Amino acid sequence: MSEYSRFKVRGYHLDQYGHTNIGAYNTFMEEARWRLFENYNAVEFFSELDLALTLVNSEVNYRRPCSLGDALEVQTKVMRIGTTSCKVQQSIFLDGGNTHVVDAEHTFVLMDKQTLKSCKIEGKAREKLEQLAQVF
């Protein structure tokens, strides 16, 4: 299972060809990740530990274009938790259907906000990410 966020393609999301701009898809996915983390108090939780989940890599596959007025559904889920990083998988579909628009895998590291270096995912931090991975 996973978290779902919905968006509508607006005129300012379009490129010169009338298709949704790559930057807009990235914004939709980022907003969906923030919603997931906020809905399960992860932002505040990690902040209290003086830690942050920091995006270090994104692999995005664009499957088909979207146009003005399309309703999109972004599916977000925490997939794998490693020693210092975790993977978040996202897919965008036309809302209400199985038409796959985008799929992506993002790698986050757990960063110590004081040293700005990655740190091990252990203890309470690991428990929180495991909770996010199993919530659905």
Image (cartoon, rainbow, N blue to C red):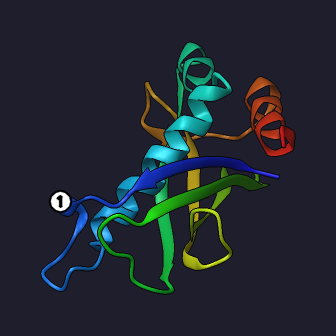
Measured as percent of width and height from the top left, residue 93 is found at 58, 69
On screen, residue 88 versus residue 83, left or right, reads left
Three-letter amino acid code at disc 1?
Tyr
Residue in view at x 75 percent, y 50 percent: 2
Position of the C terminus, as image quadrant, is top right
36 or 46: nearer the viewer? 36
112 or 131: nearer the viewer? 131
Residue in view at x 46 percent, y 61 percent: 71
Asked which quadrant contains residue 98, the reply is bottom right
- Tell me the residue that label 1 is attached to: 12
Measured as percent of width and height from the top left, residue 15 is found at 18, 76
Count the marks: 1
On screen, residue 60 versus residue 135, left or right, reads left
Residue in view at x 47 percent, y 56 percent: 29
The reply to whether residue 53 is visible in this rendering is no
116 or 92: nearer the viewer? 92
On screen, residue 70 versus residue 10, left or right, reads right
Label 1: state its secondary structure: helix
The reply to whether residue 8 is visible in this rendering is yes
Measured as percent of width and height from the top left, residue 90 is found at 61, 62
Q: Does residue 101 lie above or below 31 as drawn?
A: below
